[in-house]
Image (cartoon, rainbow, N blue to C red):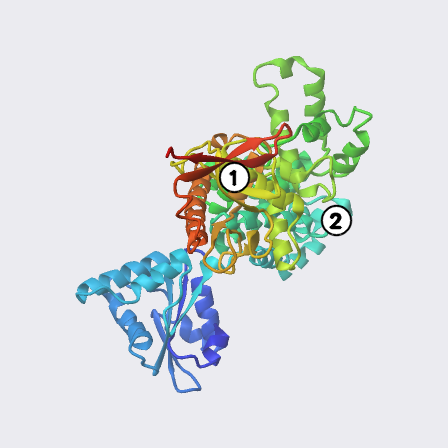
Amino acid sequence: MEYHIQSRAPGSMLIAGTAGDGKTYHCRALWERIGGDPKVWANKGNVKELRLADGRLAVFIKDLSEFNGEESDLPLERLERSVLAGDDSELVIVAANHGQLLDRLRDLGKRQGRVHPLRKPLQERFLQAGPVPNRLAVFDLSRTISRKIFDEVTRVVAGHPEWENCKRCSLIANGKVCPIDENRRRLLGQTDGGQLARRLGDLIEIARLNGLHLPVRDLLALCSNMILGYSDAREAKENLMTCADVAKIQESGNFDKASVYANAFGANLPKRRTSDRPVFKAITSFGVGEETTNAADGLLVYGKDDSRLQADFNRLIGSDPIYGETAAFRAAQNAYLEGHEGARLEGGYSEFLEMLEAQRRRLYFTLPEAEAEYPRWSMTVFRFAGDYLDIIESIKAKKPVSETVRGRIAKGLNRVMTGLLLENVDRIFIASSGGFTQSRVSILCDHETFSRRQGGVGMTIRLDDETSRPQLEVSLAPGEGNSVSFDLTPIRHEFLSRVADGVLPASFSNECLEDLLAFKAKLLRKAELVRKAGFAGDDEADSEASALTLNFIDIEPGGRGFARPVTVRAPA
């Protein structure tokens, strides 16, 4: 924003976003960076003006929502003069919520008896990442939230200079464990080289790429809850620890109730409070703690007694006496395994089952990256999310996408488009049922192409600059205009990968299935255009008008499909 002003680019500026994105913060910070007095900013008034060195008058509209009704007409008219009328005497800088800005422009247009010329292009910019209007620089803060922003929030919250005062606190003297200090150090990565923050960043990144927006305000709340969260409101008011609570917690020894790994999912908070925060809804949607594998649960339940698992148990659970193998966990585990009378009663296992959920969450964050026996993504509902992130990293590094991942995508596409259990990973069949493109089972191959782009034909995986998501681009013939693109969101990738692994499409997500069938319909239309273009100028086309060749998809015993042409001729 500062660079844009210094460049003396004509026109004005819009700082847009949703509640909690930091519009007011950016507006105030920009005011100060270009020479504005903080005291003037703090004075009453929603409009602040500053004369720039180049002679223009910088007009800051601190928050458009603070104007009521027709009050917003004047600042919007000043914006319009700058952007549409070419008035370079003023640089208008407006901070506004997406919806409120569009509503104000609509109402202003109605009062003027017209459709406001800025409303439609801004709506397309906000909703579809369309082009920005000329002479208007749009900084949409709702599109800036990413792993990088989360990393910065983590460092600001957990690395604040005031935490240095804790070093002189008696609550951590003589080897005492202060859960607040412990959680802060773990969030900073002092105990695991930053793995906790990276893996939480993975979840936030997947949520973002699925189209969910998490404001900075929510990320601040997440980091604060991870440090201060405590699951027992009787020992910590509002389920958030203060320094005054730590002595009682140390005396009771219930450190596991302050687990930073459970707090990351808002497990310490009542459901009514987590439902108010998009960030907790987003992170809990991954099902970490509820999803598991037989190997992980076998380790947690039987690991300390099974000689084959003891080494893994000691390394992965026993090595953490604060949030891993605690006295409470051992007691509940023994009661569960030995089947005490209380454990056999209805609901008697609930305490241990809750602890199992907490331990699964901890394992997701603490498992070593190369732990083949206990893959962390298998403990979430997005079991192929790691491959999805690898696709993005490979494309950014200009490296080829893993053949295993590419083959799985191709197999999933084939199974969705044909409805058959095909095993092909090197080719893609674009199939129909002879007329109805939305048919679930299609045995007629209209076109087939390579799963890897060759000679301008086949499938390639690109990265969309606007969304940062991979795009599947299937080209049916060399040259422009012969390809169809598909936005590969994390959930669509998960759907294709699960189908490739044998899951029935309808049992996972009807929405994903409909999206892919729509993609199939586009491919069928494109295949028809390519076929017609290939027949143009063909001398034999007329002589073969009475013959029709149908390519039936046959399946070999190993599951590999191939097109078998059958020519049908009309009777003479």
Which of the numbered marks, if any, corresponds to residue 400?
none
The residue carrying pointer 1 sits among few (fewer than 14), some (14 to 19) or many (20 or more) residues within 10 Å by Cα, namely: some
Amino acid identity at mark 2: Ala
Q: Could you say which quadrant of the image residue 12 lies in?
A: bottom left
Mark 2, mark 1: which one is toward the viewer? 1
Q: Residue at 64% across / 61% down in the picture?
A: 161
Q: Amino acid at mark 1?
A: Ser
How far from the left and from the top, in percent, is residue 482? 47, 55
- In the displayed structure, 26 sits above or below 326; it is below
Tally the marks. 2
Q: Do the numbered discs 2 and 1 sit on residues whose CB atoms are within 8 Å?
A: no
Q: Is residue 64 left or right of residue 8?
A: left
- Identify the image quadrant of the C terminus: top left
- What's the mark number on residue 173? 2
Let me know if residue 125 appears in the view: yes
Q: Is 387 placed above or below 98 here?
A: above
Look at the picture and state if 353 lies above or below 51: above
311 or 20, which lies in front? 311
Q: Which of pointers 2 and 1 lies earlier in the amino acid sequence? A: 2
**Which residue is disc 1 drawn over?**
285
Report x, y in % for residue 43. Answer: 38, 72
Question: Percent from the top left, x then y, of residue 273?
Answer: 46, 41
**Residue placed most toward the observer, 55 or 459:** 459
C-alpha span from label 2 to label 1: 39 Å
Please report the residue visible at 32 percent of the width from the left and 58 percent of the height from the top.
100
Around disc 2, counting alpha carbons within 10 Å, would you say few (fewer than 14), some (14 to 19), or many (20 or more)?
Answer: few
Q: In this orientation, does residue 268 appear?
A: no
Q: Secondary structure at mark 1?
A: loop
Choose between 185 and 444: the one closer to the eye. 444
